[in-house]
Image: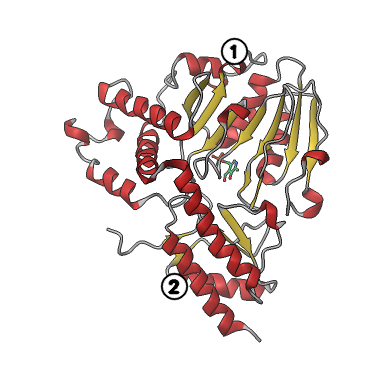
């Protein structure tokens, strides 16, 4: 099964562990004697309820989610959370603080402005092409804000927050779409964590929300039923049909992670993989990474030669060598290697070797 697979460096949807795909394939036609695939079964059936219950239990155990947090399996992608967060949380003082560290944080900041008049820009590194994360002392915080918002890992720019800002009693809301499950996090430091599943959790179509109980219960007038956290909590993510198959794959991914040793072990592997790449980049005479070294992402490494034609040649030759999706996002140019949990170490070693060869063959 694995022999024709490429090393896929896509930013999302991205690689899934081969073990997960193999299990899904084995269980495709007849899931555990049910005579049907998971895709075909009622979301209210006993077999399916076991799957969703187990997925939540695994997520709670792998991430160490405290009991006073609810877990939701929703649809609409992370982008829907850009609206759902303000619709549910802008209910006390109607104010929120946002930090822009990349285009997804910026999108969330703009979306919130549809629902509140005082959406503050608490910090931004846009003037520096988002090459770094602002320090705590650069943030302008409002102690009366209903929440503080950040995007923990900037998928397009390849930077990551290395600290959780100190915000007093203001709950921290985090978009963790491209870093969730890559390393341990202290969930108790956050009000809400949300993530589109299509990078480290499973297929697209599933959005996971982890929300502290006291933040559930109020909404702005006119909030649609499906976008009310309280209704989703009350109905245990089954107000309507949930993204059944994506939740099933997410469960398999969590089983895989747990077997591997959990998030501490995953972090070790991820640090090793990213280290191979950044170490090569820092010693290369051809390739470079322009981000602040302390803020570099473990999941998305951006790099360039500085010569657009040479970058294009690199991407073309990488495809011929069995690698895909190394072209950088159009907002940044150059190249980007997304090396999420499911990218094996051998994939990064292969990429680095290829880069070494390319450097040798293309240095003047
Ligand atoms: C950090 C981050 N936030 C939000 C999104 C948007 O997610 P979705 O496509 O699930 O709405 C992405 C997608 O790549 C992302 O990387």
Q: How many marks?
A: 2
* The image quadrant in which ligand 1 is located: top right
- Residue 170 at x, y percent in the picture: 72, 23
| Left-right relation of 127 to 285 | right
- Compute the Cα span from label 2 to label 1: 53 Å
Number of the label disc, if any, that sits on residue 30: none
**Mark 1 lies within 8 Å of ligand 1 (Cβ measured):** no
Which image quadrant: the N terminus?
Answer: bottom left
Quarter of the rendering occupied by the C terminus? bottom right
Percent position (x, y) of residue 219?
64, 15
* Residue nearest the viewer, comparing 215 with 88: 215
Tell me the SS state at disc 1: loop
Where on the picture, by quarter, is residue 322?
bottom left
Residue 201 can be seen in this image = no
- The answer to whether residue 308 is seen in the rendering is yes
Numbered disc 2: secondary structure: loop
The residue lying toward the viewer, choosing from 292 and 146, is 292
The residue that label 1 is drawn on is 217
Q: Residue 331 vs residue 57: left or right?
A: right
In the image, is the residue at mark 2 within 8 Å of ligand 1 by its beta carbon?
no
Pointer 1 local density, CA inside 10 Å: few below 14, some 14–19, many at least 20: few
Residue ID for mark 2: 321
Of marks 2 and 1, which one's residue comes earlier in the chain?
A: 1
Image location of residue 177, percent across then percent down: 56, 40
Q: Residue at x 71, y 41 (%)?
A: 106
Q: Is residue 280 above or below residue 336?
A: below
- Which residue is located at x 63 percent, y 64 percent? 303
């Amino acid at each position: 099964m694995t022999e024709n697979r490429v090393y896929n460096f896509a930013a999302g949807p991205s690689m899934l562990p081969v073990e997960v795909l193999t299990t899904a394939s084995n269980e495709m036609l007849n899931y555990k004697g049910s005579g049907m695939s998971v895709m075909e079964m009622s979301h209210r059936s006993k077999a399916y309820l076991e799957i969703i219950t187990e997925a939540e239990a695994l997520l709670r155990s792998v991430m160490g989610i405290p009991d006073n947090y609810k877990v939701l399996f929703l649809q609409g992608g992370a982008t829907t959370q850009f609206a759902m967060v303000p619709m549910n949380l802008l209910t006390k003082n109607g104010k929120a603080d946002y930090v822009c560290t990349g285009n997804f944080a910026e999108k969330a900041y703009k979306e919130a402005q549809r629902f509140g008049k005082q959406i503050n820009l608490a910090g931004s590194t846009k003037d520096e092409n988002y090459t770094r994360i602002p320090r705590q002392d650069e943030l302008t915080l409002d102690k009366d804000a209903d929440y503080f918002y950040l995007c923990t890992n900037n998928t397009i720019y390849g930077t990551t927050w290395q600290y959780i800002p100190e915000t007093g009693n203001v709950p921290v809301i985090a978009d963790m779409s491209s870093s969730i499950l890559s390393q341990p996090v202290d969930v108790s430091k956050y009000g809400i964590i949300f993530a589109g599943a299509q990078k480290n959790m499973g297929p697209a179509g599933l959005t996971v929300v982890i929300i502290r109980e006291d933040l559930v219960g109020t909404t702005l007038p006119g909030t649609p039923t499906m976008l009310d956290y309280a209704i989703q909590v009350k109905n245990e993510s089954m107000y309507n049909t949930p993204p059944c198959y994506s939740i099933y794959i997410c469960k398999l991914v969590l089983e895989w992670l747990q077997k591997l040793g959990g998030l501490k072990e995953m972090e070790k592997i991820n640090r090793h993989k990213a280290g191979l790449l950044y170490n090569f980049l820092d010693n290369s005479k051809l390739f470079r990474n322009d981000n602040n070294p302390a803020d570099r992402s473990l999941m998305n490494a951006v790099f360039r030669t500085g010569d657009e034609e040479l970058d294009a040649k690199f991407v073309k030759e990488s495809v011929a060598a069995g690698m895909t999706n190394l072209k950088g996002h159009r907002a940044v140019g150059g190249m980007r290697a997304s090396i999420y949990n499911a990218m094996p170490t051998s994939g990064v070693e292969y990429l680095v070797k290829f880069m070494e060869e390319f450097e040798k063959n293309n240095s003047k």
